[in-house]
Image (spheres, rainbow, N blue to C red):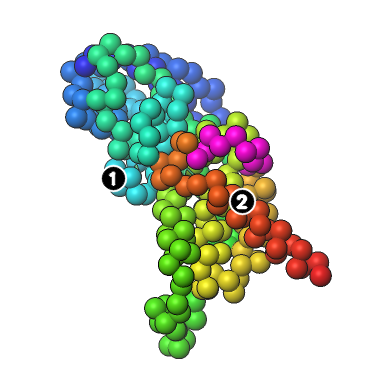
């Protein structure tokens, strides 16, 4: 395939960025999208030009590092996959592909296509964990029965990889699908109940402090989420928040 790429280039967080055109040829449909960018970067390096910065790590859909807004969609035109799992066979010879970073106030551009998603880490630090007694008296997790339905829903919520596509897709730059998944993962398990009230309040407080918008039930996040995280998790987070704040005031 021969392609025209229109790629966002931005020197650093303080510089003004712009779209730059690149031509690339002999791209196989079996290449991943990131491999196609690797080929382009090798060509740029050979010409003595600055390679394009983009985030990646596992390249198998589990770390959440890769991002990219491709032709106006987070993680590109395929469904249920991250950018690293997107294959070039989804495009046609002669196509023009627009490649931009995930855009949101809380995800500032670091360079080119790489954005700072540490806001998600700070939300996790605010409550996305279960405190464990490591004194030697730790209870075996298997000793606590968990209803199968709840275990399945908790597992589904736990598949969120923190990629940020939900934020990039949302017209309000809301992080509620991500936070809803993290809250639900623990709210559905007895192990998470102990810190449930503090968890939901602290995570929502941090989410707001980071500058993410609110949810207006558009549902774009669920459509673009590579892990199929359901909007039900946002509803559960809202119920957990109401429960926590109502009982605190009592
Ligand atoms: S909810 Fe989905 S889109 Fe949002 S961070 Fe998690 S995996 Fe990514
Ligand atoms: S590089 Fe890890 S999910 Fe894409």
Q: Mark 2 or mark 1: which is in front? A: 2
Q: List the residue tagged with mark 1.
A: 60
Quarter holding the N terminus is: top left
Q: Residue 213 placed where, x, y %?
A: 65, 39
Q: CA distance from mark 2 to mark 1?
A: 30 Å
Ligand 2 under 8 Å from disc 1 Cβ: yes
Q: In the shown orientation, is residue 89 left or right of residue 15?
A: left
Residue drawn 66% across the image and 66% down it: 197
Given residues 70 and 46, the one toward you in this image is: 70
| Position above or below: 180 against 100 | below
- Residue 221 among those drawn in magenta: yes
Residue drawn 47% across the image and 61% down it: 154
Instruction: Report helix, strand or loop for mark 2.
Output: helix
Residue drawn 45% across the image and 77% down it: 145
Where does the magenta region start and end? Answer: 212-222
Instruction: Report helix, strand or loop for mark 1.
Output: loop
Q: List the residue tagged with mark 2.
A: 235
| Name of the residue lying farthest toward the bottom | 137
């Amino acid at each position: 395939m021969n392609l025209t790429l229109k790629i966002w280039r931005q020197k650093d967080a303080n510089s003004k960025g712009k779209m730059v055109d690149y031509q690339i040829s002999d791209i196989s449909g079996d290449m991943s999208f990131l491999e196609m960018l690797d080929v382009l970067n090798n060509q740029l390096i050979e010409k003595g030009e600055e390679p394009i910065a983009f985030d990646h790590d596992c390249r198998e859909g589990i770390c959440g590092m890769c991002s990219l807004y491709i032709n106006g969609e987070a993680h590109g035109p395929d469904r249920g996959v991250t950018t690293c799992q997107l294959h070039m066979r989804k495009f046609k010879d002669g196509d023009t592909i627009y490649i931009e970073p995930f855009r949101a106030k809380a995800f500032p551009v670091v360079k080119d296509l790489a954005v700072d998603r540490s806001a998600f880490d700070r939300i996790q630090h605010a409550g996305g964990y279960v405190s464990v007694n490591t004194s030697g008296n730790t209870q075996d997790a298997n000793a606590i029965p968990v209803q199968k339905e709840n275990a399945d829903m908790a597992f589904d919520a736990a598949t969120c990889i923190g990629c940020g596509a939900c934020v990039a897709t949302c017209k309000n730059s809301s992080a509620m699908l991500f936070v809803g998944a993290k809250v639900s993962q623990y709210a559905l398990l007895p192990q998470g109940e102990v810190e449930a009230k503090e968890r939901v309040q602290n995570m929502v407080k941090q989410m707001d402090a980071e500058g993410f918008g609110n949810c207006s039930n558009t549902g774009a996040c669920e459509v673009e989420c590579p892990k199929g995280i359901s909007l039900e998790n946002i509803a559960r987070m809202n119920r957990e928040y109401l429960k926590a704040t109502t009982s605190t005031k009592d």
